[in-house]
């Protein structure tokens, strides 16, 4: 039996915990975007399915411990018992059914919520019209700040992001140096930002407001302050937000990006009225510095601009500059090595 003294201690403790949790914003389970809402429903449904097994197991564990306690002499004692068909069916059938249900739920949810899959609905009650054009946003994870480029509008903003309500958003995401994770809990799930490649996310915000975005993957000393604001606004407010950026005197050229790329912490919101048209592509291909050869040219075997005189060390690092032919057995063509020494 639990003593009255213990109950008197646990009661205020439980009330304190409830009061502390009351101030929490359960944004994952109460999101403002259609994609995040579906993910929240998936979390709730999966939890309920697992509780169908977990709760009975916990209850039966307590019942068995109480029924077969040492002081209960009325409980049957059967030391030679070793098998029960009914008990085996109960133990294995119920978890098997739950696993099948979770597997089906995972299969459907994985394909429905594929971040590369364009949206077909604005929310659960409104389909997306065929004429709706997505808002394209290019995201770059820097050390330790976020750069958002709006290629269709020719602007860029540091540590602030805005999108109109009920307009589909198409994110292209990359990183400058180390891997990060782009995460706006109210909008959609986290997507990794990795250097030398671009990942994709489709999402939509359904309610206006100011939401928090951050990096969900540790990336160094300034990681804890790598946060930004995401603004869900009306169409008119979005136009005013764009005009505010276009009124800036700053231009995000290749040289300006190289300065911005340098590590810094707690960077304030910064706006650029003009952005180099090929900047995001140059960031992905690691050739913002014009002296460097783009990765896409290394893979294609072409040259964007004249190279500096080749040395044996540079040749070893750039084997992909010339033709590289693979046979069916994955071996390199015999002409590979002679071709790299043509210069």
Image (spheres, rainbow, N blue to C red):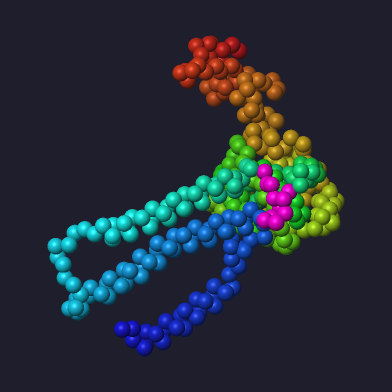
Residue in front for this viewpoint, 134 or 277: 134
Instruction: Give the left or right position of residue 87, taking residue 130 as reference.
Output: left
Residue in front for this viewpoint, 225 or 256: 225
* Residue 52 visible, this angle: yes
Q: Residue furthest bottom?
A: 4
Q: Quadrant of residue 139?
A: top right
Q: Residue furthest left?
A: 80
Instruction: Give the left or right position of residue 120, taking residue 97 as reference.
Output: right
The boundaries of the magenta stretch are 118-128
Q: Residue at x 72, y 54 (%)?
A: 126
From the top left corner, tell me how far across and down residue 341 is, in percent: 56, 13
Instruction: Give the left or right position of residue 72, taking residue 282 as reference.
Output: left
Instruction: Give the left or right position of residue 249, taking residue 211 as reference.
Output: right
From the top left corner, tell me how far across and down residue 78 is, in percent: 16, 67
* Residue 171 visible, this angle: no
Q: Decide: is 311 above or below 179.
A: above
Q: Quadrant of residue 31?
A: bottom right
From the top left corner, tell me how far across and down residue 183 is, in percent: 61, 53
Q: Is residue 127 magenta?
A: yes
Q: Is residue 136 magenta?
A: no
Q: Quadrant of the N terminus?
A: bottom left
> How many circles with numbers are drawn on the protein?
0
Q: Quadrant of residue 114?
A: top right
Q: Decide: is 8 above or below 59.
A: below
Q: Residue at x 61, y 24 (%)?
A: 298
């Amino acid at each position: 039996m639990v003593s009255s003294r213990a109950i008197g201690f646990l009661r205020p403790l439980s009330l304190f915990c409830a009061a502390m949790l009351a101030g929490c914003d359960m944004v994952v389970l109460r999101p403002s975007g259609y994609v995040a809402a579906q993910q929240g429903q998936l979390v709730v449904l999966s939890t309920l399915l697992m509780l169908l097994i977990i709760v009975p197991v916990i209850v039966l564990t307590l019942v068995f411990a109480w029924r077969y306690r040492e002081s209960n002499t009325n409980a049957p004692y059967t030391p030679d018992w070793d098998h029960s068909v009914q008990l085996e069916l109960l133990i294995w059938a119920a978890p098997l059914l739950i696993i099948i249900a979770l597997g089906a739920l995972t299969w459907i949810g994985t394909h429905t919520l594929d971040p590369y899959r364009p949206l077909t609905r604005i929310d659960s009650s409104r389909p997306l019209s065929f004429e709706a054009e997505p808002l394209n946003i290019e995201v770059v994870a820097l050390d330790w700040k976020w750069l958002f480029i709006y290629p269709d509008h020719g602007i860029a903003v540091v540590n602030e992001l805005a999108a109109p309500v009920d307009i589909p958003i198409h994110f292209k995401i990359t990183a400058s140096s180390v891997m990060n994770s782009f995460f706006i809990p109210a909008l959609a799930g986290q997507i990794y930002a990795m250097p030398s490649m671009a990942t994709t996310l489709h999402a939509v915000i359904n309610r206006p407001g100011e939401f928090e975005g951050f990096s969900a993957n540790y990336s160094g000393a300034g990681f804890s302050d790598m946060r930004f604001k995401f603004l869900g606004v009306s169409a008119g407010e979005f136009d005013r937000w764009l005009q505010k950026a276009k009124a800036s005197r700053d231009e995000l050229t290749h040289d300006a990006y190289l300065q911005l790329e340098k590590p810094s912490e707690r960077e304030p919101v910064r706006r650029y009225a003009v952005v180099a048209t090929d900047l995001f592509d140059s960031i992905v291909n690691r050739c913002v510095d014009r002296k460097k050869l783009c990765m896409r040219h290394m893979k294609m075997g072409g040259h964007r601009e004249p190279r500096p005189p080749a040395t044996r060390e540079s040749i070893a690092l750039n084997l992909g500059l010339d033709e590289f032919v693979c046979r069916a057995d994955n071996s390199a063509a015999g002409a590979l090595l002679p071709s790299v020494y043509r210069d």
